[in-house]
Image (cartoon, rainbow, N blue to C red):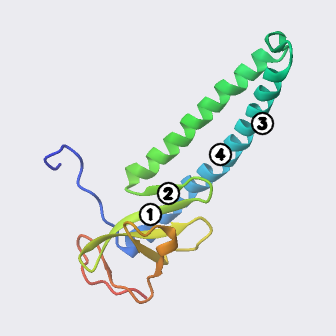
Amino acid sequence: MNATGDQSKRYFTVEEANRRLPLVRAIVDDIVALFHEVHDRKERLTRIRQSSRTAAHAALNPYEEELEQIERDLEKDIDRLDGYAKELKDLGVELKDYANGLVDFPTMIDGREAYLCWKRGEEEIGYWHELDAGFQGRQSLLERSVSGDDSAGDKMK
């Protein structure tokens, strides 16, 4: 633990990140599927709620109980999404995009903090980016040297 009580940040080598990838992939697949389902249901519910408000007798909506149950179910699924994101965080991985399954693994490149970047559908970790660069700033690992806590200077393929 450091002085603030937070755990020290974990840095991954490419090899460590790739070893963690099967579990990360499974969690991200669950996140993306549930996110799209929740998003679609939430949009439909919003449209139904808006149309019922415009009706003259919205208070007499015979489906109000059902709509409230749908809202409760949505909240449960949103909590599940939060749980999946926490699982990734506990692994040391940062979820960047629920819809596309984009995650970052903290790493050290040339003595400075950076991210190893993986997107759902990619076979392995093949990119990195600066902390503030984001997905658009991804660069190939083929020509980079990436190191972790105990393997400084590891050369990439």
The amino acid pointed to by label 4 is: Leu
Q: Secondary structure at mark 1?
A: strand
* Residue identified by numbered label 4: 34
Give the CA distance from mark 3 to mark 4.
15 Å
| Quadrant of res 150 | bottom left
The amino acid pointed to by label 2 is: Lys
Task: Of the two numbered discs 4 and 2 on the same chain, state the one appearing first in sequence.
Answer: 4
* Residue identified by numbered label 3: 44
Residue lying furthest left in this view?
3
* Residue identified by numbered label 1: 104
* Residue identified by numbered label 2: 96
Percent position of residue 111, x then y: 23, 76
State left or right for residue 19 relative to residue 28.
left
State left or right for residue 68 relative to residue 122.
right
| Quadrant of res 128 | bottom left
Percent position of residue 87, x then y: 45, 47
Percent position of residue 138, x then y: 48, 75
**Nearer the camera: disc 3 or disc 4:** 3
Quarter occupied by the C terminus: bottom left
Task: Of the two numbered discs 2 and 1 on the same chain, state the one appearing first in sequence.
Answer: 2
The amino acid pointed to by label 3 is: Arg
Asked whether the residues under the numbered discs 2 and 1 touch, taking CB atoms below 8 Å apart as contact, a structural biologist would say yes
| Quadrant of res 86 | top left
Q: Secondary structure at mark 4?
A: helix
The amino acid pointed to by label 1 is: Asp
Percent position of residue 78, x then y: 58, 36
Task: Of the two numbered discs 4 and 1 on the same chain, state the one appearing first in sequence.
Answer: 4
Asked whether the residues under the numbered discs 1 and 3 touch, taking CB atoms below 8 Å apart as contact, a structural biologist would say no
Residue at 49% of width from left, 57% of height from top?
96
